[in-house]
Image (cartoon, grey):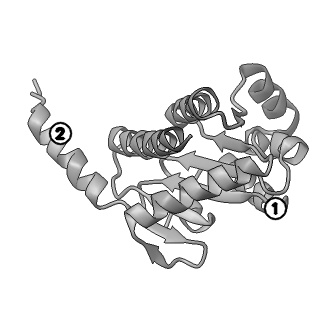
Amino acid sequence: MIRLNLKDYINELKEILLNIQITDYINTNIELNSSIETAVRTITEQSKQGNKVIIIGNGGSASIANHLAIDLWKNAGIRATTYSDSALLTCISNDFGYEHVFEKPIEMFADKGDVLIAISSSGMSKNIINGLITAKNKGCMTITMSGFKENNSLRSEGMINFYVPSDSYGYVELAHSILCHCIADIITAEK
């Protein structure tokens, strides 16, 4: 039987959180606090101009996306949405293929100036990457959150890219959730 040592688990998570790497669109390193401030400023400024926040993710990342969207609109008064409705997912998957499941609604509903937050633990999900590329083509501001391999495809695609240096789904998802809560909490406190 494997015994979980909670203190070791928490210490490893702490080490991972302290080593999150953030880069901009030209792969220049950004300091953590500065990157959070930039994400907060981007979301609030675009919201003030009437734009919305779109958050996409698969599986656990979809749950994080849904949670962030709810926190942003309920607590911070910012229009935020996800495209994780089961009817939408199955319709688009059936008609176009799962790799287009976020791309198609972003083509239809995203507006120039919206903010897209793309969350993928592996950073290799084709549907997330397609959605992000479509959002960029429509003039959206983009923020990514990824993990696993340092050279994952998503990591270099956003204006701000949060990379969690771990290959554990649990740690990567926890770190993404913490980043999202931090952003939402700061925006809410500033309202």
Residue 117: image x %, image y %?
62, 49
- Looking at the image, is mark 2 or mark 1 nearer the viewer? 1
Classify the position of the N terminus by image quarter: top left
Residue bearing mark 1: 139
Residue 51: image x %, image y %?
78, 47
Determine the residue positioned at 47% across, 45% down.
186
Q: Is residue 120 visible?
A: yes
Classify the position of the C terminus by image quarter: top right
Eyeballing the image, is 9 above or below 130? above
Residue 101: image x %, image y %?
76, 39
Quick one: 59 or 112, which is closer to the camera?
112
Determine the residue positioned at 69% across, 29% down.
84
Determine the residue positioned at 57% across, 68% down.
156
Task: Please tell me whether mark 2 sits on a helix, a strand or a loop.
Answer: helix
Inter-mark Cα distance, 2 to 1 = 41 Å
Using the rendered view, name the quadrant where residue 129 is placed.
bottom right
Quick one: 157 or 76, which is closer to the camera?
76
Q: Are marks 2 and 1 in contact (CB under 8 Å)?
A: no
Eyeballing the image, is 89 above or below 112? above
The disc label shown at residue 9, or none? 2
Residue 37 appears left or right of 72:
left
